[in-house]
Image: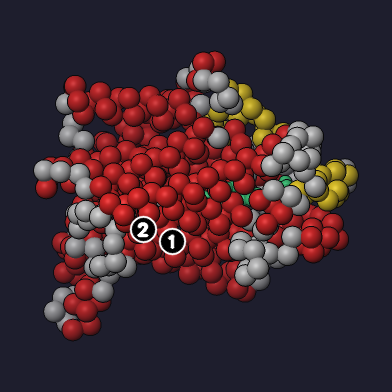
């Protein structure tokens, strides 16, 4: 059932999310990243909407070619090159891996080769920048708005295709979810794991590539633009590249683990993931780098070190919390967390076919501090990215505001799902670990 609040939020996002992205990117392009000036111009009548729109770069053949080549290249890397990284990188889990059990009891297999795709893409990027010079490393920045139109076309196309596919030729009909509400189904998706053929998995592909592989390239393109415009790359830009680079590399290093996260395990594939991965993520997660092209901030050493420490500590908490749960679940609790056997609550649940399954919820380590301390670490890292930009404008702070809303909402959504899944066992768990994000506060 779709309650009125969910429906209202969905309609709001469908209508306004594309506008929000446009507004942010346009305000950098036309207003030096000021979010207030366009509003003042419009309110005072010194500009009309049509003036702003007419100044906005349109879709170009060049951008369309770049984008098509980019996505096609990522598809080839994903589908055609089986993982070889796990053969020589100790500790890396790649190659064919199994996902979690779906509500219909299916266990999907995935070809985990994101790290390899990321490495190949970046090796080629640097080879071009330093040796071949086929295109300028500022290419992404230089075509940023025309590329936005391409990303939107792909985002809408893939979401619409996923909806049609869910109705007419689903990969696994038993895992489809129809609410009967067109907008909800379009937004949140019908199919759980849409696929083309045996290996092209929509969720894994669109979640990770092309958006997350592009993330670090986009930041590199911003750094190259700073170099071109000002003859130097500021320490704030380096910090953004390094901290976000660690996050992206971590994502690919742990791609197999990612199969067990909410996006892959619980979310259906609709506009939320399809459009979000194509447009929202590459455009809004990279706002700090974009801002620094227009406002090159050179941080004092103490500030730079402080921000680096915040980012690294946040990353450590994020990674260790996720690692503790992964280790705990993989070994079925037969492991050590902070040198001790983990404590946990035994719980059970039913799949749709009535089969009873058993699971465990850990109550020690970071999972004993709060029920989502991984999100807390993620938020600390997000704040560090924003702080690199100083305090002159609010635009770079969009990320921390957004992440706080996203992760708090996600936390509540996840807990709602866990309560429906585990019932009274979940209540026992929340009594044992009473806080969500910050021990003693929330
Ligand atoms: P979690 O990794 O926290 O997974 C939640 C699931 O873990 C629950 O549904 C439950 O699943 C299981 N679980 C909950 N509590 C326990 C426990 N005590 N012991 C064992 N298992 C437990 O959430 P996400 O998948 O949302 O996040 C993964 C990471 O990705 C996070 O670190 C998050 O910060 C990050 N992230 C980043 C985003 C970004 O845009 N940058 C967006 C979203 C996430 P089960 O049904 O198996 O019991």
Q: What numbered label is drawn on residue 197?
A: none
Q: Are marks 1 and 2 in contact (CB under 8 Å)?
A: yes
Residue furthest bottom as drawn: 44
Q: Secondary structure at mark 2?
A: helix
* Of 438 and 29, the residue lying toward us: 438
Q: Is residue 175 above or below residue 272?
A: above
Query: What residue lies at 59% left-to-right and 33% top-to-bottom?
Result: 256
Query: What residue lies at 38% left-to-right and 49% top-to-bottom?
Result: 308
Q: Is mark 2 within 8 Å of ligand 1?
A: no
Q: Position of residue 69 (x, y in %)?
A: 31, 32
Horizontal side of residue 311 vs 134, given as left or right: right
Earlier in the chain: of badge 1 and badge 2, it is 2
* Of 233 and 95, the residue lying toward us: 233
Query: What residue lies at 54% left-to-right and 69% top-to-bottom?
Result: 9
Q: What numbered label is drawn on residue 400?
A: 1
Q: Position of residue 248 (x, y in %)?
A: 44, 40
Q: Residues within 10 Å of mark 2 (few under 14, many from 20)?
A: many
Q: Visible in this render: residue 270? A: no
Q: Which residue is mark 2?
A: 386
Query: What residue lies at 21% left-to-right and 53% top-to-bottom?
Result: 298
Q: Visible in this render: residue 46? A: yes
Horizontal side of residue 221 vs 386, given as left or right: left
Occupied quadrant, residue 124? top left
In what quadrant of the picture does the N terminus appear? bottom right
Q: Is residue 417 above or below residue 119?
A: below
Q: Position of residue 58 (x, y in %)?
A: 21, 53
Q: How many marks?
A: 2
In what quadrant of the picture does the C terminus appear? bottom right
């Amino acid at each position: 059932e779709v309650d009125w609040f969910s429906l209202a939020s969905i309609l709001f996002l469908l209508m306004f999310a594309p506008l929000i992205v446009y507004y942010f990117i346009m305000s950098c392009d036309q207003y030096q990243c000021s979010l207030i000036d366009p509003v003042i111009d419009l309110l005072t009548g010194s500009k009309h909407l049509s003036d702003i729109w007419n100044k906005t770069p349109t879709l170009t053949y060049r951008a369309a070619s770049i984008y098509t080549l980019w996505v096609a290249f990522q598809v080839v890397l994903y589908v055609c090159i089986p993982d070889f990284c796990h053969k020589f990188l100790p500790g890396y889990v790649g190659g064919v891996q199994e996902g979690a059990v779906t509500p219909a009891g299916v266990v999907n297999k995935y070809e985990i080769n994101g790290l390899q795709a990321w490495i190949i893409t970046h090796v080629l990027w640097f080879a071009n920048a330093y040796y071949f010079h086929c295109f300028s490393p500022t290419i992404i920045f230089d075509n940023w708005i025309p590329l936005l139109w391409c990303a939107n076309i792909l985002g809408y196309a893939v979401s619409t295709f996923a909806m049609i596919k869910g109705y007419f030729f689903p990969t696994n009909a038993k895992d489809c979810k129809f609410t009967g509400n067109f907008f909800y189904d379009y937004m949140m998706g019908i199919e759980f794991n849409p696929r083309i053929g045996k290996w092209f998995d929509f969720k894994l592909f669109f979640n990770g590539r092309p958006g997350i592989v592009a993330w670090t390239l986009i930041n590199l393109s911003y750094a190259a633009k700073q170099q071109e415009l000002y003859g130097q790359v500021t320490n704030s830009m380096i910090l953004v590249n390094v901290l976000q680079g660690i996050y992206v590399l971590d994502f690919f290093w742990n791609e197999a683990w990612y199969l067990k996260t909410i996006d892959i395990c619980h979310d259906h594939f609709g506009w939320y993931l399809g459009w979000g991965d194509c447009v929202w993520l590459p455009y809004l997660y990279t706002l700090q780098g974009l801002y620094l092209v227009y406002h090159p901030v050179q941080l004092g050493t103490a500030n730079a070190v402080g921000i680096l420490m915040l980012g690294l500590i946040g990353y450590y908490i994020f990674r260790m919390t996720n690692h503790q749960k992964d280790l705990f679940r993989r070994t079925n609790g037969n492991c050590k967390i902070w040198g001790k056997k983990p404590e946990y609550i035994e719980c059970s649940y039913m799949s749709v076919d009535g089969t009873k399954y058993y699971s465990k919820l850990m109550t020690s380590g970071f999972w004993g501090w709060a029920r989502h301390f991984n999100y807390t670490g993620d938020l600390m890292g997000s704040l560090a990215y924003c702080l690199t930009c100083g305090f002159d404008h609010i635009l770079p702070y969009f990320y921390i505001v957004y992440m706080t809303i996203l992760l708090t909402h996600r936390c509540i959504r996840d807990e709602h799902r866990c309560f429906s899944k585990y019932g009274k066992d979940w209540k026992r768990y929340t009594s044992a670990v009473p806080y969500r994000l910050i021990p003693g506060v929330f």
